[in-house]
Amino acid sequence: MNQNNTRESALALFASLRLHINGEWVEGSTGRGENVINPATGETLGWLPHASHDDLDRAAKAAAAAFPAWSRAPAMERRRVLLEAARLLRQRSAVIARAITLEQGKTLAESEGELAGAIDVFEWYAEETRRLYGRTIPARSPG
């Protein structure tokens, strides 16, 4: 993907900002939000919807409802999900890094480094699933 296509693809991400709640991309329920501004140029990149208290409650309830199935998922299934996340980030890294740069004003190299770090985290925890032996290590402090 050339530089212009990468920039255009990154800008397209900002054209469709939504909230992800219970497996669906939705607008904020209040219609409130703010412009996302490129700090280097002042260009408006897109409109970021704000989540309301109701949106946050729906998201929390959806996460709580999904947790039992995830907690029962075998370690190798969790590994597969984490590795797929890393693969998708790597596959889309040029566009995502460009979007980070546009939104935050960082150098592209800095954005690429942050993204590489995120990919490493997903891969690290994917590999940690090989060491889930059904033991719980007690916390240092109560609660």
Image (cartoon, rainbow, N blue to C red):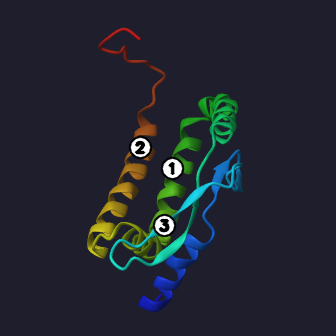
| Disc marking residue 11 | none
Q: Position of residue 17 (x, y in %)?
A: 60, 64
**Residue 89, how many percent across, how many down?**
47, 64
Quadrant, the C terminus: top left
Q: Find residue 7 and report its horizontal and vertical position in percent.
A: 46, 83
Question: Callout 1: few (<14), some (14-19), or many (20+) C-alpha neighbours within 10 Å?
Answer: many
Q: Which residue is mark 2?
A: 125
For the residue pair 103 and 118, the one nearer the viewer reads as 103
Kindly report which numbered mark, 3 or 1, lies closer to the viewer in this rendering.
3
Q: Nearer the viewer, residue 39 or 80?
A: 39
Does the rendering let one see residue 67? yes
Q: Which residue is mark 1?
A: 82
Badge 1 marks a residue whose secondary structure is helix
What residue type is disc 3 on?
A: Val
Distance from disc 3 to disc 1, alpha carbons, whole Å, reads: 29 Å
Q: Nearer the viewer, mark 3 or mark 2?
A: 3
Ranked by sequence position, the earlier of labels 3 and 2 is 3
Query: Decide: marks 2, 1 in contact (CB < 8 A)?
Result: yes
Residue 2 in view:
no
Which of the 4 image quadrants contains residue 78?
A: top right
- Position of residue 31 relative to residue 59, above or below, is below
Give the Cα separation between the discs numbered 2 and 1: 7 Å
Q: Secondary structure at mark 3?
A: strand
Q: Residue at x 44, y 78 (%)?
A: 43
- Choose top left, top right, bottom left or bottom right for residue 47: bottom right
Q: In this picture, is 111 found above or below 49?
A: below
Q: Which residue is mark 3?
A: 36
The three-letter amino acid code for the residue at tag 2 is: Tyr
Where is residue 120 shown, x and y percent of the image?
35, 55
Amino acid at the residue labelled 1? Leu
For the image, the number of numbered tags is: 3
